[in-house]
């Protein structure tokens, strides 16, 4: 894909129909009102063929790295009161996630329970964390070398019969 | 008399069901308050590694308090080409991509067990998987020792505490543990145990030996600095 183009290119080429890129926002009146996060040069891309279906990364608006790229797969997320209040306003997977996380679960669990690719779940949960719809608890740095924590895990496992 | 209800509220089918996508920069910022009750638990994890058909899935599911979850079923097709379970009798399910379970340790800590195929081709996933892990359990089938080489290499190279655990299929091992140690060329400090993936207590004890390695590593690090 052409990622850079001169202003002259933009003037000459017609804009592609955004509905062809992200089919699921192409509802009547349902246009994407977010500021465009794609590189501006993508305007110069040639028209796309009719899509055969929604591919996983279209759910993430084309982003493949989460807002916070280091979000661990075991990080716990839980819906906030704001998330509960706004759930009905959210689109598709965002809403599913907010409804799913009434009890805290791991990012990997979000992926598994909603049938999402792990990378997609990570991007979408990151968005929701940033928007304040999910609270997150990540493993502290150095946790795996924390003797007190390890000893607690040992005691917890020993209790299993 | 016309009892037909009038439809004047507009055809709901024409209304966009989700008028706007979430805008991350909308009204509410990250510091949103009001949900202080019940902070999410602190997650810790142990990686359960090994080749196809060695008993990872059984190991995780026998001790997990939730039914085993799988993230990426799309790997099945890839797995079909390299899976060698044809060589292993009585293997009916295949581990695909990443499956996992969890154990509530206490009111604050939740332990996750991530099972992963040890093949080189899944290497891209391993950093995510092992980052911050307390340790790893490398399961071997003594009939196919070579299947765990990739996992052993990885944990040695990344200095992650691990234990090699030979799964006793049908309650027996094909080789003596010392022969296994010799074949794998793991250091004498690396514990080599045998266990039964179908027995919860046996799995618990295998995980405990991993945690004792983690603890020894943590103590060593705190002394050395």
Image (tube, coloured by chain):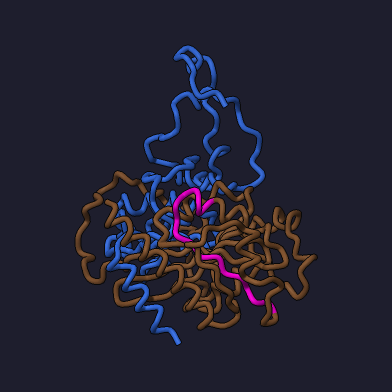
Chain colours: A blue, B brown
Is residue B163 located in the magenta-colored stretch of the structure?
Answer: yes
Magenta residues span B154-169
Count of picture labels: 0
Residue B142 coordinates in the image, percent (x, y): 68, 68
Question: Is B205 located above or below residue A35 in the figure?
Answer: below
Q: Residue at x 43, y 84 (%)?
A: A160
Residue A127 coordinates in the image, percent (x, y): 37, 49
Residue A134: image quadrant is bottom left
Left or right position of B86 against B215 = right
Q: Residue at x 45, y 42 (%)?
A: A65
Q: Nearer the viewer, residue A117 or B189?
A: B189
Residue A27 coordinates in the image, percent (x, y): 51, 47
Left or right position of A72 against B144 = left
Residue at the farthest bottom position? A161
Q: From where the camera sits, is residue A32 visible?
A: yes
Residue at the farthest top position? A8
Q: Nearer the viewer, residue B78 or B162?
A: B162
* Image quarter of the N terminus of chain A: top right
Q: From where the camera sits, is residue A85 visible?
A: no
Q: Residue at x 27, y 51 (%)?
A: B225
Is residue B39 located in the magenta-colored stretch of the structure?
Answer: no
Residue A133: image quadrant is bottom left
């Amino acid at each position: 894909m052409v990622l850079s183009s001169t202003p002259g290119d933009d003037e000459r080429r017609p804009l592609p129909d955004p509905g062809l890129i992200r089919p699921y926002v192409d509802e009547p009146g349902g246009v994407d009102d977010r500021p465009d996060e794609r590189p501006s040069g993508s305007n110069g891309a040639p028209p796309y063929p009719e899509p055969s279906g929604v591919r996983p990364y279209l759910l993430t608006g084309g982003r493949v790295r989460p807002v916070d790229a280091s979000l661990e797969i075991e990080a716990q997320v839980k819906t906030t009161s704001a998330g509960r209040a706004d759930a009905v306003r959210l689109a598709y997977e965002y809403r599913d996630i907010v409804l799913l996380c009434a009890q805290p679960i791991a990012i990997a669990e979000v992926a598994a329970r909603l049938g999402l690719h792990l990378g997609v779940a990570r991007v979408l949960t990151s968005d929701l964390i940033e928007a304040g719809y999910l609270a997150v608890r990540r493993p502290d740095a150095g946790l795996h070398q924390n003797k007190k924590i390890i000893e607690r895990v040992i005691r917890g496992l020993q209790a299993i019969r | 008399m016309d009892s037909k209800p009038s439809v004047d509220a507009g055809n709901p089918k024409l209304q966009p069901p989700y008028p706007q996508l979430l805008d991350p920069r909308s009204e509410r910022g990250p510091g949103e308050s009001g949900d202080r009750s019940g902070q999410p638990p602190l997650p810790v994890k142990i990686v359960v590694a090994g080749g196809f058909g060695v008993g990872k899935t059984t190991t995780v599911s026998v001790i997990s308090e939730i039914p085993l979850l799988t993230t990426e079923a799309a790997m099945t097709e890839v797995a079909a080409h390299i899976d060698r379970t044809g060589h292993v009798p009585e293997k009916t399910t295949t581990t695909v991509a990443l499956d996992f379970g969890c154990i509530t340790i206490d009111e604050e800590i939740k332990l996750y067990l991530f099972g992963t195929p040890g093949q080189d081709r899944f290497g891209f996933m391993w950093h995510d998987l092992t980052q911050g892990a307390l340790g790893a359990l490398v399961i071997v089938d003594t009939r196919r020792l070579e299947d765990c080489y990739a996992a052993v290499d990885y944990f040695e190279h990344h200095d992650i505490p691990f234990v090699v655990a030979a799964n006793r299929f049908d309650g027996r091992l094909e080789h003596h543990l010392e022969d296994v140690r010799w074949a794998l060329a793991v250091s004498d400090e690396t514990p080599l145990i045998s266990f039964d993936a179908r027995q919860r207590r046996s799995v618990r004890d295998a995980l405990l030996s991993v945690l004792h390695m983690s603890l020894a590593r943590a103590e060593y690090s705190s002394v050395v600095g």
